[in-house]
Image: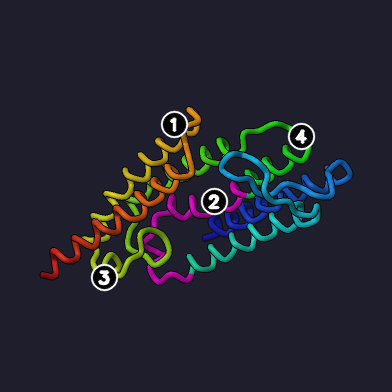
Amino acid sequence: MKEQKRLITATAFLCLIPAFIGVLLWNRLPDSIPVHWNMQGAVDSYASKPFAVFGIPALLMVLHLILVFVTSQDPKNASVPAKILKLLLWICPLLSLFVALLTYSNAFGVSIDVGMVATIFVGLLLISIGTILPDCPQNYTIGIKLPWTLADEENWKATHKLAGPLWIACGFVMILLSLLRLLSSGILFLLIIVILIVPSVYSWKLYKKTHQ
């Protein structure tokens, strides 16, 4: 329990690291900072310097703490393996550092292929989640939470055994196509549909088969 509390504190602090970096760079940062890019890697949204430096890290830290709270209130939390909870704790801190890398580098005119870097980050996240899905026990916070997976443990297990390799495969495909500069918004949308719809349809069919 103490180790988990220390990890929660450390990861929450990491969410705010970009704010400390922003303070050090404050006088060198422009008043308007890029915070969003389209699929082609072009900036399509700017934010004020205070929001970019303090607002985004603060929002991600709040999201992180909400995630921690929701997970801790799950009645089946005790059955979730520690490695899954640890991965959950690292999502927001890594996202905060990743966003800071993009915003600060772009603000200083450093050329980064934002679209490629972002899709590689998402691909790695899919691979990481995919590796833990087959071992994820029934719970109300993490995993493919459908009425029939939550109602039937065997359905949950079978669905997550399918979903794990599928998410890993889609993550690798996303990274490969991004490196080859072949990843379009249409293909990205298709990959997202695959990882969400295929396991859901599979679990539904299992449910109908066992309830005929």
Which span is picked out in magenta? 73-95
Residue at the extreme left of the image, as rendered = 212
At label 3, which amino acid type do we have?
Ala
Answer with left or right where residue 163 lies relative to residue 179.
left
The label on residue 137 is none
Real-space Cα separation, disc 1 to disc 3, in angstroms = 37 Å
At label 2, which amino acid type do we have?
Ile
Q: Between residues 208 and 83, which one lies in front from this camera angle?
A: 208
At label 4, which amino acid type do we have?
Gly
The label on residue 109 is 4
Real-space Cα separation, disc 3 to disc 2, in angstroms = 28 Å
Foreground label between 4 and 2 = 4
Foreground label between 1 and 3 = 1
N-terminal label among 3 and 2: 2
Q: Which residue is mark 3?
A: 151
* Residue 124 makes an appearance in the image: no
